[in-house]
Amino acid sequence: MFLTELGKVFVRSATYERQFLFKNPWDLAMVLWIPLATILLVWWIFSQTQITNLPIGVMDEDRGPVANTVVRYLDASPSLRVKQLYHTQADAKAAILQRDIYALVIIPENFSNRINSSQPAPIILQVNAQYGTHSGIIQTSVQGVVGTLSAGVEIQRLIKQGMSPTQAAIAYSPISIQRTSLFNAVNNYQQFLGSTVIPALLHILAMVIGATTIGRELRDRTLGQWYRYIHTGTSDLRRLTDSEQRLASKEVIHSESVAFDHMTKKASLSVLLFGLLGKYFWPVLAYSLWAALTLWLATPQDNIALDAMLTTYAAFSLLMILSFWLGAIFTLGSFSLRMGLSSTGFISVPSYAFAGVTYPYIAISDNAKYWADALPLTHYLKLHIAQLQMAAPVAISLPIVYGLLLASCLTMLLSTLLTKRALAHPERWGAR
């Protein structure tokens, strides 16, 4: 019987919220269309899975046959594109400042003659290091081109001296390194960045929804109407416009204290908890679908084990649920929608920078590590990368799932307690 009553509370609260969403297109868009557009837009941005054809400039002061070979090799590199040959450093510098090119390769005078005379013949690379990704790729590619050309020149010189091709190759490079890329060997940036940026953006949107769903009722002084709807099952919301609701609230503001004192004495935590669960039911359902869509896009052709997919999906869904409750806590704790949104922005927006995806977690300061460890996104992305990109055993990531589950339960309980407190203090409603 008790569970039946709680079930009715849940259904009534979910019905109330559904009616509100259908009457307010912007709130509905935050649940449906904005996250969907975010997912598709980010995936479209990273549809070019590998970085190719980065524009560079060349200043050929030698104009010899070997220099021409260098230019051809640079242009043939998949990661590079020789956009223009420059004759003055001023023109090249202007192109770098305007981001027409990201690097300049300078082939000095007498380059070919120095090679033919067995003298050092350096090639100068000036790269815009402000762009770390561009800079790293350009430096690696140019080094590869120069290394290949240098090896060819030296081996040919040794062969002309009478050495066999095999001996010449060994003599030129007696010690070599054999590289084995364990994960993401092809530098797929859609897998590396795209699949991790989307959870970070959904985390931000979910916290905003969590803050606004309860915060708008505090702002509009309608939290009591939500509770009465749960408690009595009335459906007057359909008959009242937003302005009429606010007017009705203002008309009875002088008697709110007595009425709500009586109401909150009867409000049990279980009733409020199930009411909140119904209130956030539609966002949780929608964002669970967006989590599934994100993971489906992230693993279209990869051979990912089913238990790894289910573990990642469970963690993703828990991250979204936790985000909703965190947004609610920040708003209920301050009795202000503005403060709640400011707090969610402060917590969620920079969280991706602390997650260790773009900047190594091990390299950040100790204080930054403490902050990163307190952010749920850090732990989820650790699981996401381990399961979907590194094929790690599921047992390694289970503690993260348990941690997200425990955090969700604790924040759910705290939100319930803060809601009961808010119902007991209607005089503090109405803050912007």
Image: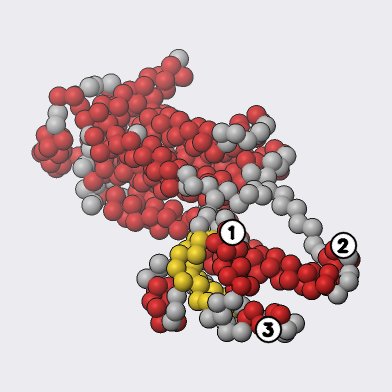
60 sits left or right of 273 in the view: right
Q: Which numbered dot is residue 156?
A: none
The residue that disc 1 covers is 77
Residue 69 x, y percent position in the rendering: 61, 68
303 sits left or right of 272 in the view: right
For mark 3, give the secondary structure: helix
Q: How far apart are marks 1 and 3 (CA)?
A: 25 Å
Tell me which amino acid carries mark 1: Ser
First in sequence: mark 2 vs mark 3: 3
* Cβ atoms under marks 2 and 1 closer than 8 Å: no
Tell me which amino acid carries mark 3: Arg
The residue that disc 2 covers is 166
The residue that disc 3 covers is 114
423 sits left or right of 344 in the view: left
Q: Between tags 1 and 3, which lies in front?
A: 3
Which residue extends farthest top? Answer: 1
Based on the displayed image, in which of its 4 quarters is residue 86 positioned?
Answer: bottom left
Tell me which amino acid carries mark 2: Thr
Residue 340 x, y percent position in the rendering: 34, 52
Name the residue rendered at 45%, 34% in the picture: 290
Name the residue rendered at 11%, 34% in the picture: 244
Residue 307 x, y percent position in the rendering: 66, 31
For mark 1, give the secondary structure: loop
First in sequence: mark 1 vs mark 3: 1
Q: Can residue 200 be seen in this view?
A: yes
- The relative height of residue 238 versus residue 126 in the rendered view (above or below) is above
First in sequence: mark 2 vs mark 1: 1
* Cβ atoms under marks 2 and 3 closer than 8 Å: no
Specify the quadrant that holds the N terminus.
top left
Which residue is nearer to you in this view: 374 or 228? Answer: 374
